[in-house]
Amino acid sequence: MESEVNYRGVVYPWQCDHMGHMNIMWYVGKFDEANWNFLARLGLSPRYLRETGNGIGGVQQNLTYKREMHPGDTIEIKSRLLEVRDKTVRFLHEMRNAETGELTATCEMTAAHMDSKSRKATSLPSEIRNMALLRVQSSGSATA
């Protein structure tokens, strides 16, 4: 699956720490915003979650910091689906300085489809899973 832009924003001065660059808590927050845009594109939208009583839970998140972001830097996060399983999806976000194109951070995440009442992972609906599988297969990635 080709990468899709799922977040655009800017680094505000109040998001920076005493060393003058964006604090790690804001990297995580911006990746979280990209999560919700990305998941909605897969069909796991806020409406779907409200209407079905299901939820999405992050079960693993691996962040890599490559370059600092400074006040005024513009940010773009592109995301791509890596793997679809019965109850989970795994995807990768790449944060870049939108002006220079330089890779500044990555976040690989595994998220589980959950029943909100039982708080247990549950199978993805077949229509969402099938659509997601097509997106992964179009990139040549393996699925399980």
Image (spheres, rainbow, N blue to C red):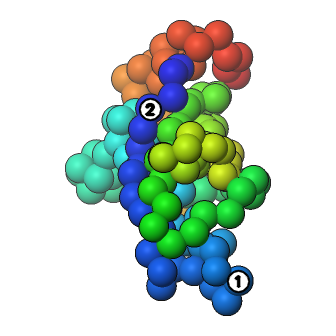
Horizontal relation, residue 62 to residue 11: left or right: right
- Residue for point 75% across, 53% down: 66
Please, is residue 78 above or below residue 23 in the view? above
Please, is residue 56 above or below residue 103 in the view? below
Q: Secondary structure at mark 1?
A: loop
**2 vs 1, front mark:** 1
Going by the numbered disc 2, the residue's amino acid type is: Glu
In the picture of the structure, the residue carrying the numbered disc 2 is 4
Horizontal relation, residue 16 to residue 143: left or right: left
Residue 8 placed where, x, y %?
39, 51
- Residue for point 45% across, 67% down: 72
Please, is residue 73 above or below residue 133 in the view? below
Q: Is residue 125 visible?
A: no
Q: Secondary structure at mark 2?
A: strand
- Residue for point 44% across, 75% down: 12
Give the alpha-carbon distance from disc 2 to disc 1, as whole Å: 32 Å
User: Which sits in the foreground, 102 or 55?
Assistant: 102
User: Which sits in the foreground, 90 or 93?
Assistant: 93
Going by the numbered disc 1, the residue's amino acid type is: Met
- The numbered dot on residue 19 is 1
Instruction: Say few, some or many: other residues with alpha carbon within 10 Å of mark 1 (under 14 / 14 to 19 / 20 or more).
Output: few
Residue 11 placed where, x, y %?
47, 68
User: Which sits in the foreground, 93 or 85?
Assistant: 93
User: Which sits in the foreground, 88 or 8?
Assistant: 8
Q: Is residue 1 visible?
A: yes
**Picture quadrant where residue 81 is located:** top right
Sequence-first disc among 2 and 1? 2
Please, is residue 92 above or below residue 131 in the view? below
Residue 78 placed where, x, y %?
50, 39
- Residue for point 60% across, 56% down: 58
Instruction: Say few, some or many: other residues with alpha carbon within 10 Å of mark 2 (under 14 / 14 to 19 / 20 or more).
Output: some
- Check whether the beta carbons of the residues at disc 2 and disc 1 lie within 8 A of each other: no
